[in-house]
Image (spheres, rainbow, N blue to C red):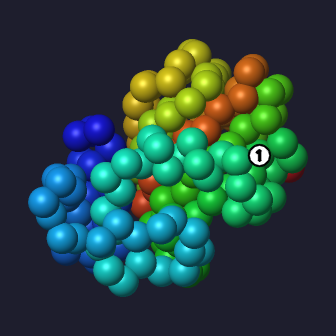
């Protein structure tokens, strides 16, 4: 969980937020529900992200992203700026080849994902630096947290 908090803190810093922290039993910081595709203006705290993902996976609060892949945006800056999104892959779904213009951080929360460089089970953390390309997919379906600094450029349709 500390890895996720560090990832979110880094992503929020890119988006202009000041802090994010783990919430303990006595803390008063609110937990913000993730469902906005708007720019982030306040810190988000997810003290039970894995539980929230489990609950979210059974709702209709997902929008089409690519065939077989739906998205639940945590935040999304305009004009291809920083964003954080949960992507839900159906079994066999694959995102077309794309190039990273900025850093992308992927944390596989459930299921499995793969790309040209390997296979990544739940708990895997992948960093794709600018200039790298890949076409991620999932054999059995997955939910992944993606945090990126800039929108990708799709190379293939």
| Residue 154 located left or right of residue 17 | right
Against 40, is 24 above or below? above
Mark 1: few/some/many CA within 10 Å (<14, 14-19, 20+):
many
Instruction: Residue lying at the far left in this picture: please name it.
Output: 26
x 86%, y 46%: residue: 67
x 18%, y 54%: residue: 25
| Residue 139 located left or right of residue 112 | right
Could you say which is closer to the camera, residue 20 or residue 77?
Answer: 20
Against 1, is 85 above or below? below
Task: Tell me where residue 77 appears, x and y as whole percent.
Answer: 50, 76
Q: Quadrant of residue 125?
A: top left
Instruction: Residue lying at the far top in this picture: please name it.
Output: 118
- Residue 150 in sight in this render: no
Check disc 1 and report its element: helix, strand or loop.
Answer: strand
- Residue 74 in sight in this render: yes
x 84%, y 42%: residue: 68
Task: Tell me where residue 107 appears, x and y as whole percent.
Answer: 45, 37
x 35%, y 56%: residue: 46
Question: Which quadrant, please, contains the N terminus?
Answer: top left
| Residue 67 located left or right of residue 100 | right
Task: Tell me where residue 48 appears, x and y as whole percent.
Answer: 37, 48
Against 138, is 51 above or below? below
Q: What is the number of callouts on the image?
A: 1
Instruction: Residue lying at the far front in this picture: please name it.
Output: 26
Q: Quadrant of residue 8?
A: bottom left
Q: Which residue is mark 1?
A: 69
Task: Tell me where residue 51 appears, x and y as whole percent.
Answer: 47, 44
């Amino acid at each position: 969980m500390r890895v996720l908090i560090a990832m979110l803190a880094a992503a929020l810093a890119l988006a202009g937020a000041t802090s994010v922290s783990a919430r303990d039993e006595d803390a008063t910081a609110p937990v913000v529900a993730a469902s906005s595709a708007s720019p982030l203006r306040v810190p988000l705290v997810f003290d039970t992200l894995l539980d929230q993902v489990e609950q979210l996976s059974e709702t209709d609060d997902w929008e089409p992203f690519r065939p077989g892949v739906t998205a639940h945006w945590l935040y999304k800056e305009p004009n291809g700026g920083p964003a954080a999104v949960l992507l839900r892959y159906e079994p066999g779904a694959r995102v077309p080849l794309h190039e990273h213009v900025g850093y992308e951080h992927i944390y596989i929360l459930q299921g499995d994902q793969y790309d040209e460089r390997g296979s990544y089970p739940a708990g895997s953390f992948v960093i794709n630096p600018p200039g790298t390309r890949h076409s991620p997919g999932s054999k059995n379906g997955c939910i992944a947290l993606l945090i990126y600094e800039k929108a990708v450029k799709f190379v293939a349709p």
